[in-house]
Amino acid sequence: MSTRSLRRLLAGVAALALFAGVASAHGGLAATQEGGTPVPTWLFLATGGGVVGASFLLASFATDREFLTWVHRAARPLSLPRSALQWTGRAVGLLGLGLVLVSGFFGPTEAMRNAAILLVWAGWWAGYTMTVYLVGNSWPALDPFRTLTLPLDEGLLDYDGSLGAWPSVVALLTLVWVEVVSPVADDPRTLAALVVAYLGVVCLGAALVGRETWFDDLDPVARVFRLYGCVAPIQRGESGLELKFPGMAAVEAEPADDSEAAFVVALVWATTFDGFTGTPLWTDVATALVGAGLPSALLYPGLLAVGYAVFLGVYWGACRTARRIAPTYRTAGNLARLFAPSLVAIAAAYHLAHYLSYFLQLSPALVQAVLTPLSGSSNPLLLSLPGWVGVLPVAFVLLGHLVAIWVAHSAAYGAFPDRVQALRSQYAVTVVMVFYTMTSLWIVTRPFSAPPYT
């Protein structure tokens, strides 16, 4: 790598580091997240950057193409009653949706006592999402919106998919913005109203373009879970369900076009945006900006747009640098699509690092609320976790980056015939991963601060 290329790459990563982080806790449930870690910050950073860098060096010794192909293609068929699981999933999904609406509109107003708040944030977004990337993507069967639109197979319009994943990018960022600036994480009535509104959008979209087209091309939630599912061990193969090495299905999950790669970046940024707005640093920055005359209404849309542009620009910049270093006839967009699935492993690791303790602590309160959806428990219980649990986020983030390194390594060897070229194509992306790891681990040590001006 030339000095000029390295300098440009590091400058971009430094800009990225200003925004890096992990997802924050939600609204009235945020009190369960104390933040911080018993591990010294300097050890966090040195270990994180060193482990990811060393993992790339170790992976570089794995140059046997037959071995790499075997690792990411090895699969064991699973004999599971798919039809029964599908109908069970639909029933559970509809029951969950009904519970959210009933408790949201008619249950207690306190977040810690309301089944809708606990089920959506602790049960669904925290707990269920973990199963998607740790076990497999069951959302197509569980999704109540997909079930309710079963009669809408044929759309009124002939949509050709020319917009790619860009509608999903806009929708995902909009949902994250609404979650941060609205009381949807605190107020059960607002949450239930948002669920009804989203159901209306889904029904309208399915009626216009058809159910399958909507959920395959346009629905942001379905796309998020589909991406998370590609790093899970249970996959859908040509002959049914099969068991693979965790993360290896992502090697062959290359996006079809640039917009799908941009959605992967949006997923990483959405998680980061949610987390960054819950840090003391953002409180200080937001206060200073408003004090300087910036309207508070522009704070979060501005951060959302600028931050995503930075993330997208840094990633594409790394891919342009990789194109020069390799060198290769492949375009920067082609390399961005090639390495995009490795970012999914990073996003999944960030989610697990933050939400495991969050989910475990709130599990007793969730069970209480589900059993009494209209009245709620007068004394919500929280699970007290041992101190060593605070070290787990380090392991999760590092493990996610190790998987990402391997996915990128395998993808490069599948794309480039020359071994040296395959290794050189990974340099820039690996540098981004090292710095992204270090800055993200630093954010893990920051205490939670309620987002200002919301």
Image (cartoon, grey):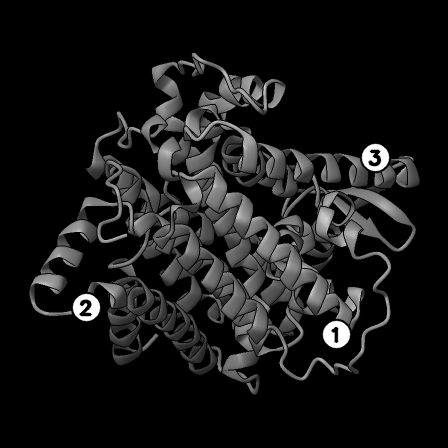
Question: Which amino acid, by three-letter code, is at mark 3?
Answer: Thr
- Bin the neighbour count of mark 2 within 10 Å (Cα to Cα): few under 14, some 14-19, many 20 and up: few
Q: Which mark is residue 301?
A: none
Position of residue 394 measured from the top left corner of the image (x, y, whole percent) = 38, 35
Question: Which amino acid, by three-letter code, is at mark 2?
Answer: Pro
- Bin the neighbour count of mark 1 within 10 Å (Cα to Cα): few under 14, some 14-19, many 20 and up: some
Q: Residue at x 53, y 80 (%)?
A: 333
Task: State the residue position of label 1.
Answer: 208
Tell me if residue 69 can be seen: yes
Residue at mark 2 to residue at mark 1: CA–CA distance:
37 Å
Q: Residue at x 24, y 59 (%)?
A: 18
In this rendering, position of residue 334 left or right of residue 3:
right
Instruction: Depth check: give the residue in front, 321 or 24.
Output: 24
Tell me if residue 221 can be seen: no
In this rendering, position of residue 430 left or right of residue 19:
right
Task: State the residue position of label 3.
Answer: 88
- Bin the neighbour count of mark 3 within 10 Å (Cα to Cα): few under 14, some 14-19, many 20 and up: few
Task: State the residue position of label 2.
Answer: 295
Q: Residue at x 65, y 55 (%)?
A: 199
Q: Say whether disc 2 or disc 3 marks the residue closer to the N-terminus.
A: 3
Residue at mark 2 to residue at mark 3: CA–CA distance:
49 Å
Position of residue 411 measured from the top left corner of the image (x, y, whole percent) = 62, 63
| Secondary structure under the numbered disc 1 in the rendered image | helix
Instruction: Depth check: give the residue in front, 280 or 186.
Output: 186
| Rendered position, 109 above or below 251 | above
| Secondary structure under the numbered disc 2 in the rendered image | loop
| Rendered position, 342 above or below 311 | above
Residue at the front extreme, as displayed: 106
Instruction: Depth check: give the residue in front, 53 or 205.
Output: 205
